[in-house]
Image (cartoon, rainbow, N blue to C red):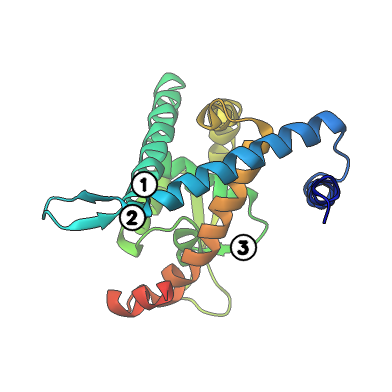
Amino acid sequence: MNKDYQLLHELIDQVGDFQKYSPHGEMKDFAVWLGKKVIAKEDFEIASDSLTNVVNNDDDKAVPFQRQENYSILALVTYLYRYARLYAKKALEEHQSAFVTYDELVYLITLYFDPRQMSKTQVIEANIHEKPTGMEIIKRLLKNNLIEQSDSKEDKRVKYLKVTPRGEAELMRILGTMRSITQLVSGNLTQQENQQLFQLLRKLHEFHNPIFLDEKEQPLEEILKKLV
């Protein structure tokens, strides 16, 4: 095939991909999108070529570059979470909020915005906590009259939680600042980068969440089989 026609066909294919990503995008948007895609491809190829390189861990064992990169991803996600907690802690302190910890605020947000009637277990699982940790958070919220509980009509052992008027007032008082913090955590990412990050994190959440809900009691050896 003539190289000019080959380039044209490749360009048409890229336009098709871009329209799936951004149906109403303009030429300048396409140019930016294509440029970033080409750079990302080049970066990936460089990383792939580097897979033959090794680095030494503490045990002086050879660790492939890709595995080392996975360690870095885990560390960076942890750092991002800690940055978010730092900003949230400052907000709670400066607003003299009734919420003592960031987790208490997140539990209340979960209850307030989720349309379902949620039990204690559901709230804990929605926030990816072990039950003892979650129960301590709920206990503090109940003690401070930020939430209240009621018995299930079907099963008296099940306790449903609800935000109290005081809890709603405290939430509304700090919610605007928390929205600003979510933007701050996104830092200097562009809108497109934010969307890409969201899609990747959601994909990872959808992979890990069923393990947390249904298989966390399984031996690690069984969970690791999901990597195959």
Residue 80 visible in the shown view: yes
Residue 140 badge: 1
Q: Position of residue 170 (x, y in %)?
A: 53, 33
Q: Residue at x 86, y 49 (%)?
A: 5
Q: Position of residue 137 (x, y in %)?
A: 37, 50
Q: Amino acid at mark 2?
A: Thr
For the residue labelled by badge 2, is the local secondary structure a helix, a strand or a loop? helix
For the residue labelled by badge 1, is the local secondary structure a helix, a strand or a loop? helix
User: Which residue is labeled 3 in the image?
Assistant: 117
Check whether the beta carbons of the residues at disc 3 and disc 1 lie within 8 A of each other. no
Q: Position of residue 90 (x, y in %)?
A: 40, 24
From mark 1 to mark 2, how far is it between C-alphas?
Answer: 52 Å
From mark 2 to mark 3, how far is it between C-alphas?
Answer: 53 Å
Residue 202, by quadrant, is bottom right
Nearer to us in this view, 85 or 72 = 72
User: Which residue is labeled 2 in the image?
Assistant: 52
Nearer to us in this view, 87 or 39 = 39
Q: Quadrant of the N terminus?
A: bottom right
Decide which of tag 2 and tag 3 comes sooner along the chain: 2
Q: Residue at x 55, y 72 (%)?
A: 152
Q: Amino acid at mark 3?
A: Gln
**Residue ranking furthest to the front:** 2
Nearer to us in this view, 193 or 82 = 193
